[in-house]
Image: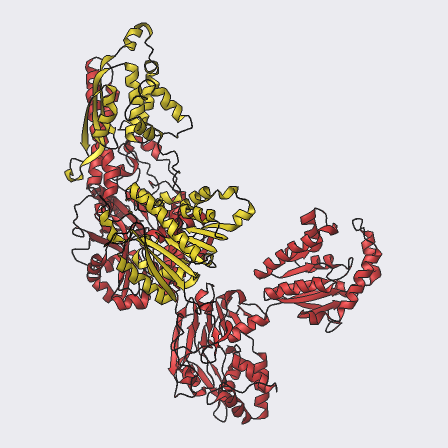
Amino acid sequence: MSDDSQELSITVPNMGLVVLIGVSGSGKSTFARTHFKPTEVLSSDFCRGLVADDENDQSATPDAFDVLHYIVGTRLRRGLLTVVDATNVQRAARASLVGLAKSHDVLVDAIVLDVPESVAVERTTARPDRDFGRHVIARQHRDLRRSLGKLKKEGFRRVHVLDDTDQVDAAQIVRERPWNDRTDVHGPFDIVGDIHGCASELRTLLTRLGWTIRLDDTGAAVGASHPEGRQAVFVGDLVDRGPDTAGVLRLVMGMVASGDALCVSGNHEAKLLRALRGSKVTVSHGLAESLAQLEQEPEDFRARTLSFLGGLISHYVLDEGKLVVAHAGLKEAYHGRSSGRVRAFALYGDTTGETDEFGLPVRYPWAQEYRGRAMVVYGHTPVPEAEWVNNTICLDTGVVFGGSLTALRYPERQIVSVPAEQQWYEPVRPLAPAAGDREPTALRIGDVDGTRWLETVHAGKIKIPAENAAAALEVMSRFAVDPRWLIYLPPTMSPVSTSTSEEFLEHPEQAFEEYARWGVTRVVCEEKHMGSRAIAVMAQDAQVAERRFGVSDGTTGALYTRTGRPFFADTTELLERLRLSAAPLFESLNTDWLALDCELLPWSAKALDLIKTQYASVGAAATHALPEALDVLEQAGARGLDVEALTQRSERRLANATRFREAYTAYVRPTQGLDGVTLAPFQILAAEGRALATTEPHDWHLAELAKLSSDLITPTRHQFVDLASIQERGEATRWWNDLTAGGGEGMVVKPAHLTDASVQPGIKVRGREYLRIIYGPDYTDSLSLLRDRNLGKKRQLARREHGLGLEALTAFVERAPLWKVHQAVFSVLALESEPVDPRL
Amino acid sequence: MNDRPYAASSLLAVALAKVFSTARSGRGGSRQELADRPIPLEVTIPVLPCRGGPPIAHRLFEPLGWTVEALPIPLDEGFPEWGSSRYVRLRLTGEVRLAEMLNHLHVLLPVLDESKHYWQGPDEVDKLMRSGAGWLPNHPEKELIARRYLGRAGALKRVALARLAELGDDDVEMVDPVEDEEVRLPEQNRLPLNAQRYAAVIQVLIETGAHSVIDLGCGSGQFLDRLVKSGAFTRVAGSDVSARSLQYAAGRLRLEQMNERQADRIHLFHGALTYEDDRFAGFDAAVLMEVIEHVDPSRLEAVERVVWGAARPGLVVVTTPNSEYNVLYEGLVGMRHPDHRFEWTRSEFAEWSEHVATAYGYTVQRRGVGEVDQTLGAPTQMAVFTRQEGRDE
């Protein structure tokens, strides 16, 4: 029977399983259709149809249920409410569904449609497609009657029985979210670690965090509120061991009651609750102190405590799912779920069942493998200092053992601690991080392989196809620098839209027009150095390298190419010189590490082989073939053949070939080892605490970089252009003409102010002569053909790779786990393997 | 952008054949007697791509009755230190039938260039036979000509990976999969050493009673093939970082033709040793044959953690070159393979393997593979790591 037969509103979990129970013809399908979305309902008839093309083919029933269970399981794993529409009158059928719900850690309710047998028979016989007789329904009815009384014991959380057709018609479904779902609460939060009866330290900590503590007539702290409306979240283990468990409870209960705080249960609360309820428990681990202290309190306080402890749940999912608080942490698959094992994990951690030499349970280091989106904040295991592990953090810094009481300010990610006033309790084992408990620097294949969708702040959701990831895996693992240094890879850059003028394929005017059209008012034109793109990541010294980058082999930085490969066999000396040159930046940015985006010059320093095999070869072939062709043409002409047009063409080609040679020669400078190599930094990617590439406009970057002066640094010349000013546009175009006439590659035009993600981060305008080494010596003769070039794909990649690069930098700056930084960097490389016209 | 508009290549060879098709077939119309006899001819090719330089041009044309002048063309007169380009200026003089001259050029231009602009179909051999009729069968260099003319028919087309190379950052050679070990060793040393290494590792695996084996860095599956065929192993897996190598391996093992029972025994997958991977775990033994020396020293720590720390097989067999032995290879300059990041002496290998064994709870034994030199040791060194019981399971 239902809890109350008059109550027609039926409450079901909004994430979980609803099992309909009723004989054929009891109206289950109609009921399901009325109250649930079509995709939420899965019927055995439908599945029979899927596997047999006939909804009534009973021989297909086992296969049909296999399919049904698979789909139900998948939906439950994905956190969707699912309704099973099958007779479910037999215990075995229900047991497998209950088992399925439990294995996905969701609640399961039953709704029984207990209509009179006669109604069911009447409906069934009215259907032409149902050929089974009255006896089948009678048997189902008997099965149902036998089951009714036992349903609750079978593991259903609630059993709703609708015992006549009126009730079936009148029923209303109410969807209820799980108790742990507080995604609508957004904080900001002050999350407090294990307190263990240290009431005085708690008051000090709250005061330090800016809370105002409310006192009662006797001077006891009975509540607190924050002037900025912050909320406290307690990770549990308020009680036991310490000097004033009652004081802690009084304050926390007051804060929870007034809505100023949330609190999850710790294992100590769970045990204290059992003890207070009179269960037999072993009085150890400081429980005795709590019981003794509570004994001193008035009866009504003990009663309030009992009800408070009884109401504590094991974890909360907060702030749109971005934050999870559980006493002993929680793996991602359990977030927002409800089951015995979820509760056990949240209270006791991922225990292996073994105990260590101190008799304490051995825990599995779940946080090391954690890859979830939500930040997980927890306590339970005392550690000397709160440390981030894969976006999880343990706040139990052992105040009762003489350590400190720690809080985390969310979303600021700021740690606030107050020291213990004394050691209140002898620790069972010394406070030391268990070996291997630190953030792992080894990455997992699942972090990068396969098709993946990455959510980025700067470029939205980006798909990385599996085949691109596979190509990147090889390049990354065979050639790239240590991933701990690889905190950024530069994006590809699109050329300007094609010029319409006679002479040019690319011209500044199009860049100005495009940016103006995108709503940019001011741009900066930066000289495009013809060299090799270089990313420099430098720590101030080996200690910083170890502390900030986790690199302990003595290296202090990396200088790598756009595909992450190291420049030269040994870049130590070059980095050392760059670090010295960049000293003013270390100082002005108050940082102990720095990442710079640069061009390494000359081009020949890195690309001499390419220049020789690709460009010089073509030059040699052209400049030796064409003069001989002209000789032959001259002889032919002398014999009276009309070869005038061909002669002119060949002369033009020879002139083009000569210009082609001059074009690449301009980027060749002799270098001896590192002598003659310079770096031209044009953006400061990041420094401690600041992802400068995302926060500062280019004029800031160029002004800061202008402070550097040494033999190593080649400055980046630049001009600002107000796009509304015809005059400034004209000046910049003249500047570009001068640059490129002198052998320069061209310029990059970038918005001078911060823009939204739809705007290209930069576009290049390459010089007329430089383009000969891209499009071939004679490209100027076929401009009309070349104008028909499609920039769409290149620009899409440019935006995505730019967004991914910024994602990586931001993640590193925010001390996100290595895998997260690496995933974004890896994705840049993966996208780079996408085929696009290499001349763009 | 390439040299084809300027250099004499297969494009020119095909154009010659087309424009002078009648002459090439030896028909002379009303002047047939002229077509039938050798006449004094002079051929000048201002820019001819010539792999192997002027000597090859002499070797190919002189046996055909030509007087050959092949002058190397400098890469760039502005940079004399860059030396010669791959082009020569070729001048041929001699008394040769016109049709033969055209056939000589038609065949030998792409042979000298060692490249063709078109996709070679199965009829390419027939084409060579037709154009070479009458002169190729007696040519002393006919094998060289045939090999170069037909090209590397097995070469796979460029894949996504090669596009990364086009960024100008990598050259294609370097991103090609590491197909063969120790390519810089002379064949007469390389082949027996490979075989000895396979045999030595299989022997270790059998001695220790391993039933399941994973070949980490299996390349194109040469060793996997032996593991599968040996019958001593119930489960064999191979992993490599190169997707192309795995394709070769799948072909070598004929994975597609295997029945279910055979296919259950063997598993190939794409992975990298610097990323922890559950698929590496669950084998009695793991083999890293000639693999570690392809890993940058700074990344070895990650490999150690992935293999010995996370996968933790009962047995790990590592082989790597013994750099001391290199002096015995005549003509070897530098390391045995262009992709080797290091080659260790015996003491360096000993130090590293002891360190890994201690750090991860293994014991280690080392031995040499191949012909032993009294003072320099064996060409290949092998370390056999055995997991200490009681630490796991």
Q: Quadrant of the N terminus of chain A?
A: bottom right
Residue A53 horizontal side relative to residue A816, left or right? right
Which residue ends up furthest to the top in the rendered image? Answer: B30
Question: What residue is at 46 percent from the left and 82 percent from the top?
Answer: A195
The chain displayed red equals A
Q: How is the image coloured?
A: by chain
Foreground pick, B222 / B99: B222
Question: What residue is at 21 percent from the left and 17 percent from the top?
Answer: B94
Q: Quadrant of residue A144?
A: bottom right
Looking at the picture, how far across and down is residue B111, in whole percent? 30, 28
The chain displayed yellow equals B
| Vertical order, A84 against B126 (above or below) | below
Residue A494 seen by the camera: no
Q: Quadrant of residue B54?
A: top left
Residue A732 horizontal side relative to residue B307, left or right? left
Looking at the picture, how far across and down is residue B125, in whole percent? 39, 26
Foreground pick, A64 / B176: B176
Which residue ends up furthest to the front in the rendered image? Answer: B374
Q: Quadrant of the C terminus of chain A?
A: top left
Looking at the picture, how far across and down is residue B34, in whole percent? 27, 8
Looking at the picture, how far across and down is residue A510, in whole percent? 33, 42
Foreground pick, A557 / B83: B83
Residue A616 seen by the camera: yes
